[in-house]
Every structure is written in structure tokens, then in C-alpha cells.
Amino acid sequence: MKQLLSPLISLYRWIVGLPPQNHPGAMKKWFFRLLSAIFTVLAIWFLFFGPGVVLMPFAPRGFQSIADSTNRVYYQEDVGAAHKVLRLAGEAQNAILDFWGTPGGIELFKGIRIFLGETSEAYYRLTMNRAGGSAMLGSIIVIDMSKAGQVLSLENFIRHELGHIYLRRRLGFIRKQLTVPVWFDEGCAVRVQRSSPDVAALGDNLRIRPRLLSVTSLRYQTDWEIMVFMEGSRLARQHYGYVGAFLEYVERRFGIEKIREYANALSWGKDPDEVYAQVYGNPLPDTEAQFLSDYRMMKGIKEEIEIIAPPLVPRVVIRWTLIFGILALAVLWTIRQVFRASRFAFKNLARFARQL
């Protein structure tokens, strides 16, 4: 039993800043020093040269900025595009507040930072992805200007990403990530766009590939990323259209107030599917089945739509394991420093008291 608890005891002593029970040998010391050096180098790269640079309070190298009362736009050379984004962001915020029935909630958008990658390479350096638009944490948006007008218009890119930011700020980042199903989050982001080519093309896409993941299996961000990687990313735009069309159906059938009520009812410890059944008086799978039946009839789709299970995608598992591992290490290291500082302060206080 003692051997089983030994790693936990060692971890506890490390967190609270106590010396190990058994002093490590020279080889082990050098090994941990090497790990610490590697972690420090990676952290510096991430924050100053990688995507973490958007988290820093200063502008990335080669970027300038302009701002209004709620947004700051960072651009490289095209100041005209930056002014356009600033205007579109203001219009998007008003549209999002109207959708959620909170017209006076402009304070929720204070401090938004929008980065414009004027080339695909510049966008990739800031995000490490090729999506075209990314909402990061609760205040940062990055847009690939070279893709604006291709996948989505610039206006719709801004509305979509600000739609994500709104929910993160209104509910809190952690609560939003853990309680709001990704189908609902993405569906609302599509809904607040001025238009959605993905929703418009859904019928044609389903004739070509009559396969979908059920909204009940699109709960966490990892589920959405797995879908994106399926079949060489061919299903991605199809599912943006699917969750957008499904949310529009729910709004028509139950009313927009039910959408707002559902968002407010999502909370810790509650299964979002159970919350859905309570708010709408209808289980989510039944609503989805009825939507697919009505949609096939409306679009004249003869093929049965196959509901497929999400596969296990190793790269997504590895990515999120690394993300949560780094976050856990950072939290534990911070706690360790607090304990060490507290012990140091108490020692100094005790020494000062003895001198008195």
C-alpha cells in the first residue's frame, strides 16, 4: 500500500514545496533540470514566437493596431482592411446582442482583440491551424484575410467568431467549455452570420455524402475536432451547415426564447441533453430525427441519411492530452510557487519575531 501511495506522496511534497523524502541522485537531478530547461524554452517560444504571442499585452512583431470603444484590430500593412473590420465588428456585436435579447450588453465585448493575418502563413503562425478564423479564450479573434470571401465573407467570419466570444464571456470561459454542447455553440455562431453558404449547400452535400454525426455526439470541442479530421476534412463544411440548419429549425419550431432559455439553463452537473428535454419538452434525438425527416422531404433527398459514430483520431487525443497536461503542470507549478513563497515569508517573519 505504501508503495502505491509513494508517487502521490512525492507529488504532494513537490506541490507544497517540501524536499523529497529520498534525495534524488545526480543523474535524476540532471534529468529534471533538462526537462525544466526544455519546458522553459518551449514556454518562451510559445509566448514570444508562437501562437501564444496573441496573449501578450503588446502587439506581435510587424503588427500595428487601431481601436474603438470595444475592439482593437491588429494589422500588418492594410490599414483600410483594419478600419473595415472595426466597422464590421461593431455591427456584428449589435446583431449578436439582438439575437440573444440583450441589446444593452455591449460591455460584454469590451477588450476584444482581433488579429488579421494578411497571408495564410501569418495566420498559421498566430494559430497553428488552417481554419481561416479562430476565437481563442474569451477575447481574441484571428482571421485569415486571404480566405475572406472564399469559405466565408469577411463579415461572416467576424460574426461567427464574435458569436463564440459572446457565449464565453456571458457564461464564463470554463462554464461555456464544459456545459455548452459544441453543436449548440457552433449552431448559434452560424445563426448570427448574415448568411451561411454552408446551410445553403447542405442539401447538395447530403446528396453527395449522405452521412452525418448526430448532434448528440457533438458535445465537446474534441468531438468537433474529430469530425473535422474525418474523411480528409470533407465533412467539416457539411456539419457547419448541419448544425446551422438544425438550430434554425429549432428556432422556427419552438421560438427564439427557447434558445435563450436553453443557454441560460446549461450549468454545472447537468447533462445538456436532459436540460434540452426539460426546456423544449422533447428529447434531442427526437427533435433531430424529425428535422432530418422534414429536411429530406423539403429538399427531395431520396437516400437515407446515415448517422455515423465518431472514430478515435490519435492526433486529436494527443493534442488535447498535451494541452491539458501543460495546463495541469502550469497550475501545479503556480501552486508550488505560492506554497514556497508562503513558507519563505513565514520563516522570515519568525526570524524577525525572534530578533525582537
Image: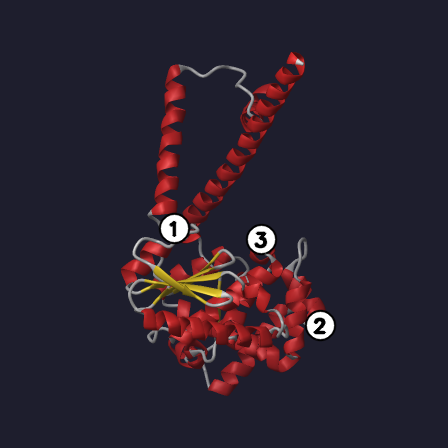
Q: Nearer the viewer, residue 268 or 89?
A: 89
**In which quadrant of the rendered view does residue 284 lie?**
bottom right
| Picture residue at 45% right of the left edge, 48% below the top | 320
For the residue pair 266 and 64, the one nearer the viewer reads as 64
Q: Earlier in the sequence, mark 2 or mark 1?
A: 1
For the N terminus, the image quarter is top right
Residue ID at (53%, 39%)? 331
Classify mark 2: helix, strand or loop.
Answer: loop
Above or below 296: residue 171: above
Mark 3 vs 1, N-terminal side? 1
Name the residue type under label 1.
Val
Determine which quarter of the picture holds residue 348. Answer: top right
* Residue depicted at x 42% and y 75%: 155
Real-space CA distance between mark 2 and mark 3, rounded to the nearest whole angstrom: 27 Å
Judging by the rendered image, the residue that carries numbered circle 3 is 174
The answer to whether 259 appears left or right of 308 in the picture is: right
Q: Is residue 1 visible?
A: no
Determine which of the numbered discs, if any, sits on residue 53 in the image: 1
Between 3 and 80, which is closer to the camera in this rendering? 80
Q: Say what amino acid the circle numbered 2 marks.
A: Gly
